Image (cartoon, helix red, strand yellow):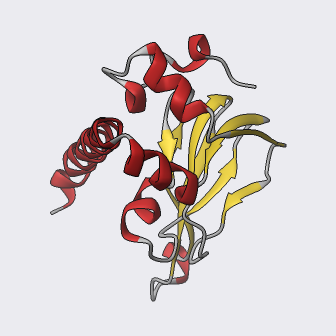
Amino acid sequence: MISYEEVAGFPVFEDFTVEQINQVLTCTSETHYEKGSVLIRESGASTDVYVVIDGRVDVEIQSYARSPLNRGNKRLALLRIGDIVGEMSYIEQRRRAAKVSAFDDVRVLCIPKVELDALFAQEPKLGFLFMRNIARIISQRLTELNFLWRDDV
């Protein structure tokens, strides 16, 4: 079982109390993936959220460019310890936007949407903090992406 100490400094748990983190941890399971294993399939239907505990995960999209030179998987991000993945499908309940695979052997905290939503229904402040932190993470990622792409426009 993952402990409070392992996740306390992670951005998704920013401003959480010890008790609040432990409440979320009761909804979670720890999962291990070997290097190269797929955690999330692009266009998949799951809505679970993952937090990287050890290792790195590769986030890629399939490119269908007309030029053969630009086809194939395109890396969007290489996420590390403390990063969250799967948050977009958690929020929108749509197909997965990208493929996520283990870049190294990884250990993740899997948080099922159904259990998380049930907890947030009982503890609305906890739900607010979690969603605010997800909004911050998405905003930071979008800002970084904007800086990467601004020279290509």
The residue under the point 28% across, 36% down is 125
- Across and down, in percent, residue 54 comes to 68, 26
Q: Quadrant of the C terminus?
A: bottom left
Residue that sits furthest to the right in the current view: 34
Q: Which quadrant of the figure contains the N terminus?
A: top right
Q: Among all residues in the image, which is located at the extreme top?
A: 5
Residue 76, percent from left and from top: 45, 54
Between 9 and 58, the residue placed more toward the observer is 9
Query: Would you place residue 135 above or below residue 82 in this image?
Result: below
- Position of residue 52 relative to residue 75, above or below, is above
Q: Quadrant of residue 89?
A: bottom left
Q: Specify whether residue 84 is in view.
A: yes
Q: Is residue 77 visible?
A: no
Image point 26% across, 46% down: which residue?
135
Of residues 126 and 95, the one drawn nearer to the viewer in this rendering:
126
Residue nearer the viewer, 94 or 115: 115
Residue visible at 53% across and 34% down in the picture: 24
- What is the residue that sits farthest to the front in this orientation? 122
- Please give left or right for residue 116 compared with residue 31 in the image: left
At x 69%, y 24%, the residue is: 2
Total marks shown come to 0
Residue 151 screen position, x and y as percent? 17, 52
